[in-house]
Image (tube, helix red, strand yellow):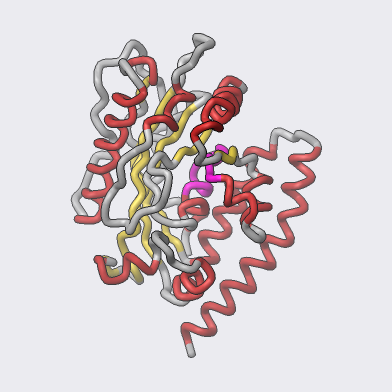
Amino acid sequence: MRSFLLRLSRIATYLAVTLLLLPVQAALVATKSQLAAAFPRFYHRMCCRILGFRIDAKGTLSERHPTLFVVNHVSYVDITILGALIKGSFVAKSEVARWPLFGVLAKLQRTVFIERRIHSAAAQRGELTRRLAAGNDLILFPEGTSSDGSRVLPFKSALFSAAESTTGMPIVVQPVSLAYVRLNGMPMGRLYRPFFAWYGDMDMASHLWELLGLGVAGVSVEFHAPVMANAFPSRKALATYCRDVITGGVAAALSGRERDGAGSAPPTRETPASPRAGVASSVAGARA
């Protein structure tokens, strides 16, 4: 009964907040306000509190613009976690645009929707490049799908093509590792990880219903050292580097090993400066 009431409470509060703030974001987007990019972060932080996510963020968030944030993908709730930390737009598969409610929210955050078909690759690269050229930060899930949360799937190097700037503008790429590590203060382990990871042929509605009744989840997000895309000989080399760094970050988070929050970067032609001292070890606005 307690879990049932918790689910109802979270659903009711989430819908109330979403329906209240959705028109605000719509107005900001329609008027092309500068707040349209920052407002979703406020919204996602509120959602983290409502849904019971406690974020432990390590490392230094890139403040260079544009930055392409490269992240492993575990679940649809990754959007809320990352949205609470990063002021940027997501790159998502085109199907998301048709999802009830979530599709509307994605559009209001100026998500870039991409097709899986090969013949659309050139147009999609053009849109991603245009957004980066405009100074927009983008959040990319290069696995192309979500995993079980215990491993990082191979990266699709074609999705890194937008980082191959043809305008001479340097593109900063920051690997970010994300892992669901604790449940109600205890290590989550393989038994409970699938309750948060959404993959395969899982039904979203039933998965979300189970997730909402589980209590408080601890999420580890690590911002690794940013690199310059033009320091790599090819997008495949860049994809391989990012996957290696993120795989190490996920493994460390799942095992509970302490890390300093910065992955080693290869020699670069330019090292992106990050004046911010670091992401707070616990995000105040994203506590349950």
- Specify whether residue 85 is painted magenta: yes
Location of residue 147 by image quarter: bottom left
Residue at x-position 40% and y-position 49%: 73
Q: Is residue 67 visible?
A: yes
* Image coordinates for residue 79, horizontal then vertical, percent: 51, 51
Q: Is residue 135 visible?
A: no
Question: Is 41 on the left or on the right of 231, as rendered?
Answer: right
Mark count: 0
- Specify whether residue 189 is painted magenta: no
Q: In the image, which residues are magenta?
A: 82-93
Q: Of 149 and 227, which appears nearest the observer?
A: 149
Residue at x-position 42% and y-position 44%: 144
Above or below for 181 versus 257: below
* Image coordinates for residue 58, horizontal then vertical, percent: 34, 43
Residue at x-position 48% and y-position 28%: 67
Q: What residue occupies the far bottom of the structure in this picture?
A: 1
Above or below for 4 versus 267: below
Q: Of 121 and 190, which appears nearest the observer?
A: 121
Question: Is 88 on the left or on the right of 187, as rendered?
Answer: right
Above or below for 237 versus 34: above
Question: Is 237 on the left or on the right of 57, as rendered?
Answer: left
Question: Is 46 on the left or on the right of 255, as rendered?
Answer: right
Location of residue 46 by image quarter: bottom right
Residue at x-position 38% and y-position 15%: 230
Q: What residue occupies the far front of the structure in this picture?
A: 119
* Image coordinates for residue 93, horizontal then vertical, percent: 53, 45
* Image coordinates for residue 218, horizontal then vertical, percent: 37, 61
